[in-house]
Image (tube, rainbow, N blue to C red):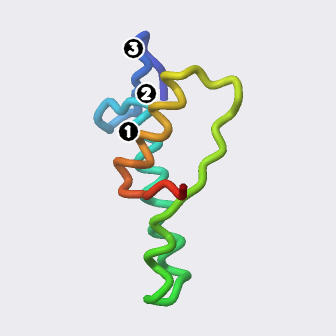
Amino acid sequence: SKTDPRGTILISGQPDLTPEEIMTIMFKNLRQNVNKQLQPDEKRRAMEYIIAVPPFFSSEQRFLLLHAAHLANLTKVS
């Protein structure tokens, strides 16, 4: 895999994916794996998340991380 100047990750044989798209895929995969371990009445809780954003992330990186979680249909815990 390589990175082009736009920040898009190029993976051989795959469409170009942005870091945000890769994070969305990772969040969806994580949610699916958690749901496999839960009882049916617990699955709603697997849709709620708490994400620790590294302090060195820029505002844009922080937004993209949280937006990827939103795209993965996760709900922020308030």
Mark 1 secondary-structure assignment? helix
Q: Secondary structure at mark 3?
A: loop
Which residue is denoted by mark 2 in the rendering?
A: 9
Question: Disc 3, disc 1: CB below 8 Å?
Answer: no
Which residue type does callout 3 highlight? Arg
In the picture as drawn, the residue positioned furthest to the right comes out as 55
Residue at position x 54%, y 31% in the image = 62
Q: Secondary structure at mark 2?
A: strand
Frontmost residue, 25 versus 67: 67
Spatial separation of the CA atoms under disc 1 and disc 2: 10 Å
Residue behind mark 1: 21
Q: Position of residue 58 (x, y in %)?
A: 58, 20
| Residue 46: % across, % down | 50, 70
Residue 31 to residue 61: above or below: below
Task: Choose the circle earlier in sequence order: 3 or 1.
Answer: 3
Where residue 8 sits, quadrant-wise, is: top left
